[in-house]
Amino acid sequence: MRQRFEIPMPVRYLVNGVLIVLLFLLGQFMISAGILSSYFQKILLQVGVYIIAAVSLNMATGYLGQLPLGHAGFMAVGGYTAGIFLKNFPIKGLPAFILAIILAGIVAGIFGILIGIPALRLKGDYLAIITLGFGEIIRVILLNIDTVLGFKFTGGAAGLMGIPKYTSFPAVYICVVITCLFIHTMMKSRHGRAILAIRENEIAAESCGVNTTYYKTMAFTASAFFAGVAGALFASYLGLLVPGDFGFMKSIEILVMVVLGGMGSMLGSVLAAAVLTIVPFALQSISQTVADYRMVIYSVLLIVVMIFKPSGLLGTYDFSLTRIIEGLINRAGIHDGVARKGEQSK
Amino acid sequence: MAMLQVDSINVFYGSIHAIKDVSFTVEKGEIVTLIGANGAGKSTILKTVSGLLRSRGGAIQFHDSPISAAAPHKIVSMGLAHVPEGRHVFAQMTVEENLEMGAYTRPQGEIAPGLERVYAQFPRLKERRKQVSGTLSGGEQQMLAMGRALMSQPALLMLDEPSMGLAPLMVEQIFDIVKELHKDGVTVLLVEQNAQMALSVADRGYVLETGKIVLTGNGKELLEDDAVKKAYLGG
Ligand SMILES: Nc1ncnc2c1ncn2[C@@H]1O[C@H](COP(=O)(O)OP(=O)(O)OP(=O)(O)O)[C@@H](O)[C@H]1O
Ligand SMILES: [Mg+2]
């Protein structure tokens, strides 16, 4: 019988690993050789931050099937946590930065648990409403907490200034890879199957013995954790945070990335995040007024996609280089040779 | 002691007292049926046994261990499977993926033999194993929901109206399968509105009226009972 050729698992990891390293080296080379100006480097860093934000939101939206509207709120929690930590921690440099990122994720994750447990218990659209409220409450708290406390904590409307700027291309790149790898691995595991089963049919999932409360909370918390990481990178990239950075529209922007890319497709989220981060810059260089109307453009884009391809540009398709290679080999019929070689070596 | 022992459970929806002091037992190897009109509380009882709803007071014992406070997923892994009313399948997954999800509480190694067993019981599912389950017919979806529950290797299978909305021929098929499962040693708690069918396969039955058990007996007795005939068998 003619069998489909499949690349063995270790080779798969190797191919992906090599690809990740090559992409990193390419980026590093372009920066050190001066091919990417500092303007483009800035854009690149933002692209990374939004990739993490979108991929993490996709976890809650695409995989878990919920509709959180306060993702920017979790970014704010992470951003301010990292900012305040970096400003006050006695040790400076890389260790402090790594600690700040982890801490930002943890604090955002704790907020995720606190909101997720009550909100996910309720059926229907409560999660959307509760997270919407959460995002706005966080923003208002960040704005006013200094007056309440009576000392400088978040900097209020003027913003949190003087955050050490550590966010670099390698830092963002590594965080993007870790985020994607973590979520990918989780979704391929038993836990991932439980999460997808809940999205498909919660009653059936429960009757199969899936602990639905646990998995819903876990996926939502992981989503919040990585939003916090994105927030930390954002904080240390700008050096300055204002509560207005994390308003409702920001949450919607991230949601648009996920929906456009295709809910449940990690590659879709990555690509849409990249495109939708770059587009405003491109528009800005054409004219400021056009850039100001980008939300209008997004809305139209969203409507068009919903009409012509409701599942998003990539649907639930996930990119796999090894699968493409397999496909090519199988089509070319080379695989007979490869398979025979495999047998001989046994 | 009985495999499943339910002792005076009381279930409320808010202030509505849906189940009033209900007690019943299921012995190992039996088919027991709960029959009753719409809204009598049949589904509520099954949901309470499987941990989705809680009883106020009373006790539920399965294999001699109390389960009235256990979480639903714990109860599934103890060997009590519930096929809920209304054919809940994972619509975007294939038949086989659905069945694999059914073995979620079991070790990985049991999936392949489990599939083989279920495919032997449901040849129709085997034919359609690569089909996306949302596109199956109603009867096929019901078979899938039952097959999926069997993947967890249950000692007790609770079926909530497996014949609902199916054509007579399909209803017969479903009941034939129930009989076969029974022959293979699965204990069944069957909830039905189709009292005729249910009582003809059941060893014993309980008749439920507005949250109370009003009558009990073996299948034949109940089939010939005048009150039952009048209320559920159309004279
Ligand atoms: N979630 C709920 N909230 C309030 N009342 C409920 C709820 N679920 C069921 N009930 C009520 O509890 C009673 C029993 O319902 P249940 O679903 O157990 O009936 P049933 O015997 O399964 O009926 P059917 O044969 O129509 O499925 C009904 O009066 C119903 O209206
Ligand atoms: Mg019912």
Image: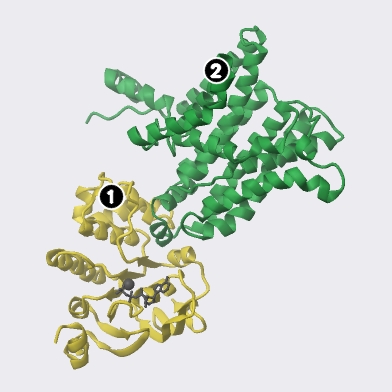
Chain colours: A green, B yellow
Q: Quick check: A209 above or below A149?
A: below
Q: Nearer the viewer, residue A314 or B224?
A: A314
Q: Position of residue B62 (x, y in %)?
A: 44, 76
**How far apart in space, not on screen, are marks 2 and 1 (Cα)?**
45 Å
Residue lying farthest bottom?
Answer: B226
Asked which quadrant contains residue A167, the reply is top right
Q: Position of residue A189 (x, y in %)?
A: 48, 44
Q: Quick check: A25 above or below A185?
A: above
- Is B48 positioned to the left or the right of A27 in the image? left
Mark 2 against mark 1, which lies toward the viewer?
Answer: 2
Q: Amino acid at mark 2?
A: Ala
In percent of the image, x 27 and y 80: which residue is there? B37
Label 1: how many Cα within 10 Å (few below 14, some 14–19, many 20+): many
Q: Which mark is residue A156?
A: none
Residue at image mark 1: B133
Dividing the image into four equal quarters, which quarter contains ligand 2? bottom left
Q: Badges 2 and 1: C-beta atoms under 8 Å apart? A: no
